[in-house]
Image (spheres, helix red, strand yellow):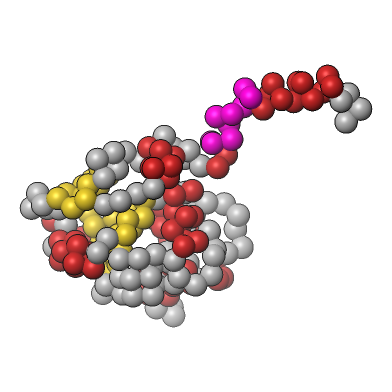
Amino acid sequence: MDKFTTLTGIAAPLPLINVDTDMIIPKQFLKTIKRSGLGVNLFDEMRYDSDGNEVEDFVLNKPAYREAKILVSGDNFGCGSSREHAPWAIKDFGISCVIAPSFADIFFNNCFKNGILPIALPQEDVDKLMDDAERGSNAVITVDLDSQTITGPDGGEISFEVDAFKKHCLLNGLDDIGLTLEKVASIDTFEAQAAQSRPWV
């Protein structure tokens, strides 16, 4: 997993509440077990019409937001089913930070396991960042995980909270497998001792 330290990029505004995981990545795209390739289908039913053509007024189809790295959205983001494909699709599109007033718990935790920083902020702070995001290609925001700050286009700064352990994992690019591999020496020692004391196992 890539390390998340400082992210500077265009923020896309998605002023919707209760954005569920089926909106993020519809069920027909859940057949894959790969984390790559889902970005093209992110928000599929909002991005494309029934013929597969882009819907021009959907935010991620607008020229200013095609390279967005940050998403600013409404309350209860990521609700619905627990599909991990939702953060996979967000990350594969190129978005590494989602900012909202609140998140569904499972989606929130899945983000950290996939290199995405979900930031929950008071509504007034989200409203300010939403206004910033609506500036189009000028909506450049910097998210600094180490200092736990968000800097807007005008230089205004907002602080955010993040769990210390989750912060450590993101800063060091550690998913569950990476955390286990940190203990590989201890695991090898245990296995060697177990093989000597219980050779029949």
Rendered position, 38 above or below 26: above
Left or right: 2 in relation to 36: left
Q: Residue at x 38, y 70 (%)?
A: 76
Rendered position, 115 above or below 196: below
* Count of marks placed on residues: 0
Quadrant position of the C terminus in the picture: top right
Rendered position, 124 above or below 5: below
Q: Position of residue 177 (x, y in %)?
A: 57, 39
Q: Position of residue 65 (x, y in %)?
A: 25, 60
Residue 190 visible (yes or no): yes
Assess whether residue 89 is covered by the magenta stretch.
no
Rendered position, 30 above or below 111: below
Residue 6 visible (yes or no): no
Q: Which residues are magenta?
A: 178-186
Q: Residue at x 67, y 27 (%)?
A: 187
Q: Residue at x 55, y 42 (%)?
A: 176
Q: Residue at x 35, y 49 (%)?
A: 162
- Which quadrant of the figure has residue 193? top right
- Which quadrant of the figure has residue 101? bottom left
Q: Position of residue 139 (x, y in %)?
A: 16, 57
Q: Nearer the viewer, residue 200 or 92?
A: 200
Left or right: 167 in relation to 35: left
Q: Position of residue 92 (x, y in %)?
A: 43, 53
Left or right: 165 in relation to 180: left
Q: Residue furthest bottom?
A: 50
